[in-house]
Amino acid sequence: MSEVSNPPQGATAEPVLALKSRSKVIAVTSGKGGVGKTFVSANLASALAKRGLRVLVLGADLGLANLDVVLNLYPKITLHDVFTGKSKLEDAIYKAPGGFSVLLAGSGMVEYSRLAPEVRDDFLRIMESLVPNYDIVLLDTGAGISDVVLFAVSMASEVLLVATPEPTALTDAYATIKVLGAQQKRQSIRVVINQVARTGDGTGITTQLQQVLDRFVNKDSEHPLKLLHMGDIPADTAVRQAIMKRQLLAQADPGCPAALAITQLATKVESAVIKHGA
Amino acid sequence: MASATDPSAIRLSDLRLDDARALLEHDPSCELPKPEASPTVYLQSVLDGLCELSLRDPLTGLSNRRHFQHLLNMEIESVARSGESVLLLIIDIDHFKKVNDTYGHHAGDLVLQAVSKCLESCVRPMDTVSRFGGEEFAAILPNCPATFGAVVAERIREAVSELGITVSPSETIHVTISIGGAYAPEWVRSTIELWTERADEQLYRAKSAGRNRVFIEEQRGVAVSADEKGMLFGHLLFGDPASAGVDGDAPGSAVADSEMNRAN
């Protein structure tokens, strides 16, 4: 019945990046795939860029990311090519339509339990050299709670968990929250609920998650985990239309409810990071 | 070199098809059309026949290793995005050398064929069984929930152990198998090597523990207990209006029950 039967090597509680760099990194994660994590990352990045921030989206989603669909961007060169010496780092950084930068990890990191420490070190080294060029780095992790995801999250000061009201998505989100609390001694996780039927539904969902957490996890923990509700993104037909046009919401339909929700989210994310960094 | 006809046109008489034809005519499952009727249809049949041959193990008729690795790769790509639960089993006949040594190689072949047939009859049509080499087989079971895998593998083990294999007019023998299994990691793109290595490790455990048994790698993951789920989705059971937005899922115990079956 133990929560974590076999903690992965390497996913430790210690910050793996120097604190100054780490403070700018936000991991965008989700328990389950297909809840709109990549969509949120890209559109949040564009909203942050609009606020005058220098933003990098780092797709650690092992080349699965649908960034091409969301942004109409087809990065051919990835971090993997940089690691293997095939390309230079600056060639792997692409300018996205929303005024932010995109770097994809590529397929170099597979089943992470076997990932060589060199790759991990390479990754950290590159993060250290990259982060100073930006105000905020959104680390789009893979779904689930594999070691790749845990490693990616361990580089971030803040975690933004994307979930939907759908039961399997909530169960997986809850599982992810538990692991992050147990393995990384996180004290807070920020939650955004995507595809809510009505604005306000997400607050109830986060409250529900917090109550379960308090009852089953926090009660005998020295590190009580607090969920911070960052907002809801309403189910909006404009989202589908934007994706079909391969455009960001801000381009396709800047006034739609989902776009407004993402703008609000960006304000909250900015203040969270700036405060943290101060 | 210059020719008045379409330069891309191929004439059958220019091709050396003897070897291919001989291979295909040797195979009882393959029937070639007459080349005179349509050279295109004939050539297509030759190519199809060769592809078919190159994917199948001749002795057992199962997928061969080449085909299996191709399927495994496709499964890896799909599972990386779907997070679906897919089980890989590696199956090895216990003490197969003894069968060969005692009853001869023909008996060995009969055993391989009988076991193959039995393995195929134990799995769903969507599953693939392959002869990996020698007396080793592999099976890929897509969409196989964690709780089912061990039961299916156990059923396979039992079915083979109960199989009477007639190796000569006077002799019927029994063999056993050992099975090692590993699930694809959820949401992660694995590789053929890493995945088979993990299943192989379990097969090794099964052999070391005395053979004729099943070992399946425990899935790492966080169990979300029934109590936790009950509290998480309690409002669905009581028809809380807040649940109405849940994707058209009918609120009620059906939702909660199916959730109970997930992930642990």
Image: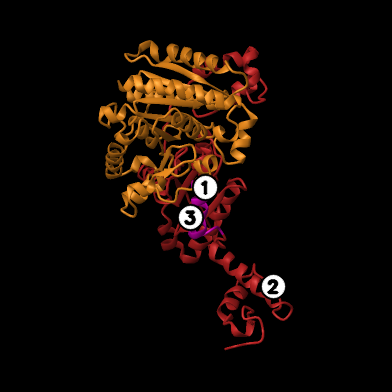
Q: Are marks 3 and 2 on the same chain?
A: yes
Q: CA distance from mark 1 to mark 2?
A: 32 Å
Q: Residues within 10 Å of mark 1 (few under 14, many from 20)?
A: many
Query: Which residue is the site of mark 2?
Result: B41
Mark drawn on residue B69: 3
Looking at marks 1 and 2 on the same chain, the residue that comes earlier in the sequence is marked by: 2
| Residue located farthest toward the left when viewing the structure as drawn | A18
Mark drawn on residue B75: 1
Give x and y (percent) for residue A22: 31, 29
Secondary structure predominantly adopted by residues drawn in magenta: helix
Q: Amino acid at mark 1?
A: Glu
Looking at marks 3 and 1 on the same chain, the residue that comes earlier in the sequence is marked by: 3
Host chain of mark 1: B
Colour that chain A carries in the picture:
orange
Q: CA distance from mark 3 to mark 2?
A: 30 Å
Q: Mark 3 against mark 2, which lies toward the viewer?
A: 2
Give the residues in magenta: B62-76
Q: Amino acid at mark 3?
A: Gln
Q: Quadrant of residue B241?
A: top right
Horizontal side of B37 relative to B77 (left or right) equals right
Q: How is the image coloured?
A: by chain
- Residue name at image x 57 percent, y 66 percent: B51
Give the red chain's letter. B
Q: Amino acid at mark 2?
A: Val
Q: CA distance from mark 3 to mark 1?
A: 10 Å
